[in-house]
């Protein structure tokens, strides 16, 4: 089972001007002392169209992590506006927080982000070239989307694949859709793809 | 709707909730449900009453079994991920949303995994808590059964090996003497808990068993007399085999299912026939009730008093029945199936009969096994038994606290690594901490220039002392700007609700009325804000980053953290202790051997003298200060004038009564005391045991002696018996051994008791009189060869002269294992006799420390076995007269120990069993009274 459970993420300084750093206060619980650090990342999705516009805003190591409840604030600079397609600057996009242990991602927390002009006039007639100084970033903090992945907490990524394929005995009795350890297929996500605990 | 299979269901002992275990989306799933909406339709319709209380998807693979501990504090779950997890409700109260879940599925109760038990190398199929929650057993497809120490997780007690196939079911004997397991290897095995060896291997009813079932959940009847197996075959028809406790006979079975029986579950209650109004009360035998579930999707319910099933329900489910759980009241039952549903069945008293109350059930246990399950049952009734004394409450709480402290690794593991909450907080409020967290947190750079944050530890793993508010997703910024977005309807993930919960069955007949599944229609994200998420964006939430460009290189491992290796340390420490013990017992053996030679050497001349001399030995109220030497010398210096002059041994030989198989006599009219002797009732470890039973004003007690009783006598105060081996034993009116066994020089010819004097005339024409209360003991005492079956797993070794003398004999266990074949009431009597003998011997040897040690064990045994009379007599003796009077012969000290101090030590032990709270209060008050004087 997962040794680390994220209990809460509070979005600080929200809403805020587009250029402000992102601040997430993350509370997590660890079942057992961790031998290695956790690695947290904030990824800003520059465009819904393609992953190539993703920006890793920052990555931090968090440790040492003994058993217990812990919290920290993860602050990262605002995205580089030069890397965002102009057509995608205003409107809805996504910011992701991921955490990996021994290079294996075990949780992904996503928020919708709405970037819009505060000035009603700009809102009516947005400039062709986005004016980032006038943009406000609003993270939909109340609606995090949390996806958890099973990883091998004891070993590294290669061995994990094996451990995910265990479970020979019960499979024979389960409908094929119940195969454990398979993430839902891309694109055809049912609403329940969100892992609730 | 395709439902995920539910493999296990278990109702909480308090009946307010139940747990299910099964397959989740991509993991195993344990869910805790509210019972109220199942039982009452109005609760089901009331939206304020939650249906689901908590869900845990921590198991990596399908959960095969969930079981509540008998005290209701813990839930154990076992799954295909080879793990057993033990859950406990987190201390902080009130619902809190789980991060990332929609509000509807918020966990109302917080259950956290307090320990993970890793040992099995294959899927865990069944778990079972022992009576009293002393052990937790788990069985697995790795062919083994592991017994865990439930008071000290994750300590393992033992691994039971012997099955040659997948072990798929476990059940404890309600008396706690056995555990039974059933496996795919066509066998059902019964294991003893005293030495964890196999007691019986039953194969015949299973030899024909072809095919396989996912589980083989067998069950033991609440009276302990019958064990009923899952899948067995009789004349190529599937059955549930009934195995009798007596000789493990397999003469009966439950027949009728068309496919293999997967689960058998006895009703926890014992019933008796309901008395109909007007009909004459007929005495009827109590009977048990048993539910049988099968792969044929049907359920049958049997009463052991009926030859045919009480009821059979066909096609209850679409797929095989997997588990059954009765409510503690015995009138309700939950059944779960592979088809992903759970059904609730409701019975009436007319259908099942009148359930016996706990007291009646205990008396049945008492009659069969000589043991009441008093402590368990008081625990179960704790909520209903009123604690009348604050002191008792204190001891009860202490007991619970220590039980809690001992269980779960949470208490021990994080203490060094995680500072306590208050030390972190330093008087600061959590809000303050949160405001300054960014500034305060320690951030460093690693060698390769990466940011590294040291997280702030805000709580130990297992404390509940933190504000739940912290964990609700409320941003601390006071600006109300984002409040609107909080109203956004949240994505529903209700389709994980794979359980049917929308049913209420008022009577037994309308069983088919239950809903397949109450999957709620998902609410779509309607835009309260202007956000309209795009599908492309949605996919980003769940897609795992394969290789995120940038800084995914190597993660440097941190040096500052060394994982604690506690269990290992513990093991080595234990080993050391063991080797120490072994060496010391070796040397004790030698010493004991030497000692024996010495005592034998001394005894011989003494016996010769004894035989030729007439001895009077009486002195009432003799001062206790007398050393043993003095009391031993005395008889020889006081020849009596009454009887004949000294004569040589060989010359005088008085007739001795012959040994009878059994006899009885009335020793006193007022109060009426009857004595019954039965010789050679059982053979244990090469010695024949005889039983002495006494009935005094309707109260019975009995004890065992290692030799045949030749003569017996009694007065209103004491009882004495002389045995073939020339041992004289003296008991109090309540059956407490008053003196260590006294070795007579020659066999007893006549025996007489009057008040508290015992007179013995031996075949060698010696007349001896003992005043019991002066504790004058002349002869070498022989420590009786009883073996204790003490429930103590951690008996601290007491050292002293007694231990040295018995060093060789006292390696309990070995002989105790032989005892396990004797019925429980025999074991109980033997233990009692042994303990009393230890006490008396310690007294004779003037070993104060050992006396105190055995006294406390004796008291604990009496408390556990619910032996009130003896307990009361013990307290009375320790307390002495409250008011001073000249006539009393009571001594305030024994062996230099103040008796009332001893009583003070005994009382907390008594306070642990609520049954004795009146006794506790009575003596506590008197002690207080005396102290104030």
Image: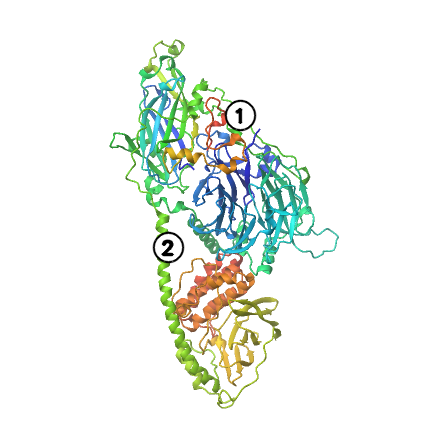
Which disc number belongs to residue B307? none
Quadrant of image for the N terminus of chain B? top right
Of residues A114 and B157, the one drawn nearer to the viewer in this rendering:
B157
Real-space Cα distance between discs 1 and 2? 56 Å
Which of pointers 1 and 2 lies earlier in the amino acid sequence? 1
Q: Are circles 1 and 2 on residues that touch, CB within 8 Å?
A: no
Q: Would you say B833 lies left or right of B234 here? A: left
Chain ID at mark 1: B
For residue B264, above or below residue B315: below
Q: In this rendering, does residue B674 appear at all? A: yes
Q: Are marks 1 and 2 on the same chain?
A: yes
Residue B184 in picture, x, y percent from top left: 55, 45
Indicate whether B617 appears above or below B197.
Answer: below
Q: Residue B658, position in %: x, y? A: 59, 79
Q: Which residue is mark 2?
A: B574
Would you say residue B887 is visible in this rendering?
Answer: no
Closer-to-camera residue (B356/B900): B356
Left or right, residue A185 beside residue B364: left
Q: Secondary structure at mark 1?
A: loop
Q: Name the colour scheme.
A: rainbow
**Number of residue marks:** 2
Picture layout, residue B536 above or below residue B191: above
Q: Quadrant of the rendered structure where residue B690 is?
A: bottom right
| Circle 2 chain | B
Q: Residues within 10 Å of mark 2 (few under 14, many from 20)?
A: few
For the residues carrying marks 1 and 2, which lies nearer the camera in this image?
Answer: 2
Which image quarter holds the C terminus of chain B?
A: bottom left
Instruction: Point out residue B599 in the picture as x, y percentages from the top left corner.
Output: 41, 76
Q: Which residue is mark 1?
A: B522
Helix, strand or loop under label 2: helix
Figure check: B242 above or below B562:
below
Residue B814, percent across and down?
Answer: 46, 62
């Amino acid at each position: 089972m997962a040794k680390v459970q994220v209990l809460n993420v509070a979005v600080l300084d929200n809403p805020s001007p587009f250029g402000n750093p992102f601040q997430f206060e993350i509370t997590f619980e660890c079942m057992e002392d961790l031998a290695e650090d956790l690695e947290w990342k904030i990824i800003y999705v520059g465009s819904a169209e393609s992953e190539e516009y993703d920006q890793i805003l920052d990555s931090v190591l968090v440790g040492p992590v003994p058993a217990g409840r812990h919290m920290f604030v993860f602050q990262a600079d605002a995205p580089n506006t030069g890397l965002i397609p102009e057509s995608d600057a205003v409107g809805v996009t996504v910011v992701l927080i991921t955490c990996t242990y021994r290079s294996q991602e075990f949780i992904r927390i996503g928020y919708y982000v709405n970037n819009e002009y505060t000035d009603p006039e700009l809102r009516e007639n947005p400039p062709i070239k986005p004016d980032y100084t006038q943009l406000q970033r609003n993270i939909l903090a109340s609606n995090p989307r949390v996806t958890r992945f099973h990883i091998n907490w004891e070993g590294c990524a290669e061995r994990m694949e094996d451990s995910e394929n265990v479970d020979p005995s019960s499979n024979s009795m389960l409908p094929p859709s119940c195969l454990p350890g398979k993430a839902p297929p891309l694109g055809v996500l049912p609403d329940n793809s969100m892992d609730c605990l | 709707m395709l439902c995920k299979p539910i493999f296990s269901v278990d109702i909480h002992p308090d009946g307010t909730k139940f747990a299910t275990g099964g397959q989740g989306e991509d993991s195993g799933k344990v869910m805790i449900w509210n019972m109220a909406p199942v039982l009452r339709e109005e609760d089901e319709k009331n939206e304020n009453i939650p249906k689901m209380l908590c869900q845990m998807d921590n198991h990596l693979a399908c959960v095969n079994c969930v079981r509540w501990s008998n005290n209701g504090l813990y839930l154990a779950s076992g799954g295909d991920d080879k793990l057993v997890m033990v859950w406990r409700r987190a201390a902080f109260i009130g619902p809190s949303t789980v991060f990332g879940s929609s509000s509807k599925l918020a966990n109302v109760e917080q259950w956290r995994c307090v320990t993970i038990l890793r040992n099995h190398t294959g899927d865990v199929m069944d778990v079972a808590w022992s009576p009293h929650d002393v052990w937790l057993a788990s069985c697995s497809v790795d062919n083994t059964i592991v017994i865990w120490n439930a008071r000290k997780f994750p300590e393992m007690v033992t691994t039971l090996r012997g099955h040659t196939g997948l072990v798929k079911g476990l059940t404890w004997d309600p008396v706690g003497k056995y555990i039974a397991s059933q496996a795919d290897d066509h066998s059902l095995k019964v294991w003893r808990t005293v030495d964890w060896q196999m007691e019986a291997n039953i194969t015949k009813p299973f030899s024909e068993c072809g095919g396989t079932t996912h589980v083989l959940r067998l069950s033991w009847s609440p009276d302990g007399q019958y064990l009923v197996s899952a899948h067995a075959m009789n004349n190529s028809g599937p059955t549930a085999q009934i195995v009798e406790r007596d000789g493990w006979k397999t003469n009966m079975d439950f027949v009728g299912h068309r496919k293999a029986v997967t689960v058998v579950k006895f009703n926890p209650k014992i019933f008796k026939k309901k008395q109909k109004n007007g009909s004459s009360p007929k005495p009827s035998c109590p009977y048990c009730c048993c539910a049988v579930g099968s792969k044929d999707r049907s359920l049958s319910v049997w009463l052991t008093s009926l030859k045919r099933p009480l009821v059979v329900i066909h096609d209850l489910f679409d797929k095989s029945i997997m588990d059954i759980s009765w409510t503690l009241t015995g009138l309700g039952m939950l059944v779960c199936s592979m088809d992903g549903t759970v059904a609730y069945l409701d019975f009436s008293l007319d259908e099942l009969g009148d359930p016996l109350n706990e007291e009646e059930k205990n008396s049945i246990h008492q009659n069969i096994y000589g043991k009441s399950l008093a402590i368990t049952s008081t625990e179960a009734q704790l909520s209903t038994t009123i604690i009348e004394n604050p002191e008792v409450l204190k001891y009860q709480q202490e007991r619970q606290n220590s039980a809690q402290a001992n269980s779960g690794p949470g208490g021990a593991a994080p203490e060094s690594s995680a500072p306590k909450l208050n030390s972190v907080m330093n008087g600061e409020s959590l809000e303050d901490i949160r405001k300054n967290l960014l500034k305060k947190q320690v951030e460093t750079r690693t060698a390769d220039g990466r940011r590294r944050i040291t997280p702030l530890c805000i709580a130990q793993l297992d404390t509940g002392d933190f504000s739940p508010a912290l964990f609700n997703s409320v941003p601390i910024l006071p600006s109300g700007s984002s409040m609107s977005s909080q109203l956004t309807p949240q994505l529903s993930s209700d389709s994980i609700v794979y359980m049917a919960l929308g049913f209420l069955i008022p009577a037994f007949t309308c069983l088919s009325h239950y809903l397949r599944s109450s999957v709620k229609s998902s609410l779509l994200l309607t835009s309260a804000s202007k956000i309209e998420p795009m599908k492309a964006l949605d996919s980003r939430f769940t897609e795992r980053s394969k290789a995120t460009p940038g800084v995914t290189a190597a993660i440097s491992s941190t040096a500052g953290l060394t994982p604690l290796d506690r269990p290992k340390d513990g093991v080595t420490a234990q080993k050391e202790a063991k080797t120490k013990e072994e060496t010391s017992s070796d040397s004790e053996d030698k010493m004991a051997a030497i000692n024996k030679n010495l005592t034998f050497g001394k005894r011989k001349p003494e016996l010769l003298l004894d035989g030729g001399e007439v001895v009077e030995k009486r002195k009432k109220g003799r001062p206790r200060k007398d050393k043993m030497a003095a009391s031993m010398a005395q008889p020889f210096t006081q020849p009596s004038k009454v009887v004949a002059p000294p004569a040589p041994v060989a010359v005088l030989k008085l007739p001795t009564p012959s040994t009878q198989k059994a006899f009885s006599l009335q020793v006193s009219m007022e109060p009426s005391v009857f004595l019954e002797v039965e010789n050679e009732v059982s053979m244990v470890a090469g010695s024949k045991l005889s039983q002495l039973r006494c009935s005094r004003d309707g109260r019975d007690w009995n004890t065992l002696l290692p030799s045949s009783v030749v003569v017996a006598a009694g007065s209103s105060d004491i009882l004495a018996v002389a045995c073939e081996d020339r041992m004289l034993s003296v008991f109090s009116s309540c059956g407490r051994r008053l003196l260590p066994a006294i070795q007579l020089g020659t066999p007893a010819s006549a025996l007489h008791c009057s008040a508290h004097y015992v007179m013995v005339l031996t075949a060698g024409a010696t007349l001896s009189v003992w005043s019991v209360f002066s504790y004058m003991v002349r002869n070498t005492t022989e420590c009786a060869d009883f073996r204790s079956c003490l429930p103590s797993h951690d008996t601290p070794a007491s050292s002293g002269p007694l231990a040295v003398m018995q060093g060789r004999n006292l390696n309990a266990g070995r002989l105790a294992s032989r005892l396990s074949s004797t019925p429980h009431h025999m074991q109980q009597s033997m233990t009692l006799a042994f303990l009393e003998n230890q006490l008396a011997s310690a007294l004779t040897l003037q070993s104060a420390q050992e006396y105190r040690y055995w006294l406390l064990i004796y008291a604990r045994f009496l408390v556990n076995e619910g032996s009130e009379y003896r307990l009361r007599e013990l307290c009375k003796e320790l307390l002495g007269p409250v008011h001073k009077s000249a006539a009393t012969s009571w001594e305030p000290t024994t062996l230099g120990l103040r008796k009332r101090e001893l009583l003070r030590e005994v009382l907390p032990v008594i306070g642990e069993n609520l049954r004795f709270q009146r006794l506790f209060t009575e003596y506590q008050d008197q002690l207080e009274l005396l102290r104030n004087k």
